[in-house]
């Protein structure tokens, strides 16, 4: 394997780009004539966000939010902390939260509830990956790149202990890395 500590590539760079373009086209059609605030959830969604937004042909604003729900490990603590809030006002705007992966759903449930209190015109979720088997709360994405099995993945922005984010594809880590 060309990447260190990786067992296999789950989704290739080419597949990611192809699917991201499809999602961007869908978003462009769905919001025709509307303004859109795209919110990148740092840090995991950064690469997906960068590839997605440049293919959206609309009048858009960007903003960034940083949250933490994970300590070191491969499962969510369920507790979400805002490290950095968005700067833009949300009232009356169409908002899309752009996330790397929906796992337990806790992070997005928390963020959607928080932003709804600020009276957006609409709020939707775009996520590169969805792991429905792991869901603990009822939350659904509106624009999903890929539905994946219950395996811990890294790359294309996703990390394990802050590593592997720069791998350009979505990969399954060797299990001995997080089991040891
Ligand atoms: P949730 O709150 O459990 O839905 O978790 C969302 C966050 O957990 C994501 O934004 C990721 O940062 C992290 N996460 C969940 N599954 C994975 C994975 O397979 N690889 C890397 N990070 C993950
Ligand atoms: Mg994340």
Image (cartoon, rainbow, N blue to C red):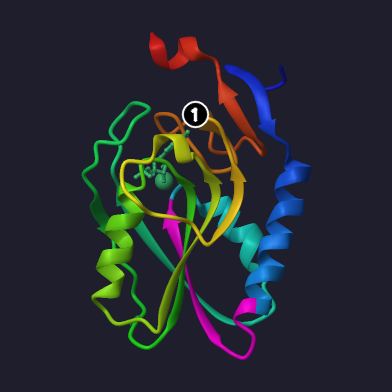
Q: Residues within 10 Å of mark 1 (few under 14, many from 20)?
A: few
At 28% from the left and 33% from the top, the residue drawn is 71
Asked if the stretch drawn in magenta spans residue 82, the answer is no
Instruction: Locate the C terminus by quadrant.
Output: top left
View quadrant of ligand 1: top left
Foreground of the two, 130 or 54 = 130
Q: Is residue 81 above or below residue 167?
A: below
What percent of the width, then of the height, locates residue 151?
51, 26
At 35% from the left and 81% from the top, the residue drawn is 120
What percent of the width, then of the height, locates residue 106?
30, 48
At 45% from the left and 35% from the top, the residue drawn is 133
Please indicate whether residue 2 sits to the left or right of residue 148 in the image. Answer: right
The boundaries of the magenta stretch are 30-42
The residue labelled by disc 1 is 150
What percent of the width, then of the height, locates residue 40?
46, 61
Callout 1: SS: loop
Q: Is residue 80 above or below residue 88?
A: above
- Is residue 4 in view? no
At 49% from the left and 29% from the top, the residue drawn is 150
Foreground of the two, 26 or 86 = 26
Please indicate whether residue 53 sits to the left or right of residue 141 in the image. Answer: right
Q: How many marks?
A: 1
Please indicate whether residue 140 sits to the left or right of residue 79 in the image. Answer: right
Q: Is residue 144 above or below residue 101?
A: below
Q: Is residue 91 above or below residue 14?
A: below
Instruction: Locate the N terminus by quadrant.
Output: top right
Foreground of the two, 40 or 34 = 34
């Amino acid at each position: 394997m060309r990447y260190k500590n990786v067992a296999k590539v789950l989704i290739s760079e080419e597949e990611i780009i192809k699917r991201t373009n499809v999602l961007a086209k869908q978003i462009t059609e769905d919001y025709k004539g509307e303004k859109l605030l795209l919110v990148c959830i740092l840090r995991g969604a950064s690469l997906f966000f960068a590839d997605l937004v440049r293919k959206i042909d609309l009048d858009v604003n960007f903003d960034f939010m940083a949250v933490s729900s994970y300590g070191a490990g491969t499962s969510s603590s369920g507790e979400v902390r805002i490290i950095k809030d968005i700067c833009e006002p949300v009232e009356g705007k169409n908002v899309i939260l752009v996330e790397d992966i929906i796992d337990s759903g806790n992070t997005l449930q928390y963020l959607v509830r928080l932003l709804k209190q600020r009276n957006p015109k609409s709020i939707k979720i775009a996520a590169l990956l969805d792991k429905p088997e792991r869901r603990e709360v009822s939350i659904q994405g509106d624009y999903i790149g890929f539905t994946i099995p219950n395996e811990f993945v890294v790359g294309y922005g996703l990390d394990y202990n802050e590593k592997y984010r720069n791998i350009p594809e979505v990969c399954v880590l060797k299990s001995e890395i997080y089991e040891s």
